[in-house]
Image (cartoon, rainbow, N blue to C red):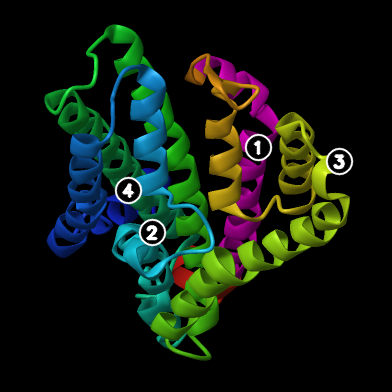
Amino acid sequence: MVSLSSEFIKGFKRSFQRWTILLAFGTAMIPSFFIFKAGKRLPLRENGYVVKIIAENVNPPLPLELSAQAEVLFLFLVILVGANAIRDELRKKAGESSVVDLRYFLGKFVGHAVLFSVASIISVLIDAVLLIYVGAPSSRVLLKDVLLEGMVFSLMVIQLLALGYLLSTVSSETSTPLILALVAMYVIFVTVPMAVEFMLYLTYAPMGELVKDPRIVDAEVRTLVTRYLFFEPNLQMSEIISGAWEGGEKYIGMSFALRKGIYNIANLLVMSVIYLCPAAFRVYRSSKKNPEYR
């Protein structure tokens, strides 16, 4: 009988492979280069500038332009790591002792979630330090806002990781995880945002000058993203961060943004669970075939 703690810890430790750690932190720091360049050109007069620059580089405006491709490499790596997490173990025969146990699966997911969350938060803090170096005001309030921004970013990363784990259970029998990861990224970061942009154009273009108040459009976009695009992690993060500006102009802070974007935060958390549950169920069914884990 395998104990709960030993299998969970085994999976947790397996997630911290050297190449994964290096790639996670290496790719997470890519936006720092673009942030440093942007910070030298922009007037960094208040905390809102810092928060906005960081948000637009770790989660670039959509649809993606060619210059933003390198900046989402970290997000692609998250999905790819998840898509390869347990694929090889699931492809083994059920009679072998290496069949994935549910406790091992959960431990590995938690380990990867911790790794990529830490990389996300540290990268955002480093971005803030670079902007302070080139002229942004330094304060405890700014540090708190950037830290909260990093936590929101980590929730987005965890959802993408959970999607990758779901793909891992699928790719054990079908296509390669690389192809599935590329398709998932294309749908999330290109196809759906372009469809949303087209829908908004059809809605507001005929109105022309009638739409003079941007708050009307902002409210409609928030409703659209929160209610109907709940599965889009990048759009959820964008809506949360945008709540830090009152009326889209006056910066009021990330604390207010988190309260205003509570439903967007819930979307990120719920979708992570929705992706993880069928993957865990598939692993559970696989482990039931192995007498060692009964």
Is label 2 in a helix, a strand or a loop?
helix
Mark nearer the viewer, 2 or 3? 3
Q: Is residue 42 visible?
A: yes
At x 25% / y 42%, what residue is drawn?
38
Amino acid type assigned to the residue bearing label 3 in the image: Leu
* Proximity of marks 4 and 3: CB atoms separated by less than 8 Å: no
Instruction: Measure how far apart labels 4 and 3 are at the Cα level.
Output: 45 Å
Instruction: Measure how far apart labels 1 and 2 are at the Cα level.
Output: 19 Å
The residue to which callout 3 is attached is 210
The location of residue 83, given as percent across then percent down, is 43, 72
Which secondary structure dominates the residues rendered in magenta? helix
Magenta span includes 58: no
Which label sits on residue 264? 1
**Magenta residues (range):** 255-284
Instruction: Measure how far apart labels 4 and 2 are at the Cα level.
Output: 10 Å
Q: Is residue 95 visible?
A: no
* Proximity of marks 4 and 2: CB atoms separated by less than 8 Å: no
Q: Sequence-wise, which precedes: disc 1 or disc 4? A: 4
Instruction: Measure how far apart labels 2 and 3 are at the Cα level.
Output: 39 Å
Amino acid type assigned to the residue bearing label 4 in the image: Phe
Q: Sequence-wise, which precedes: disc 4 or disc 2? A: 2
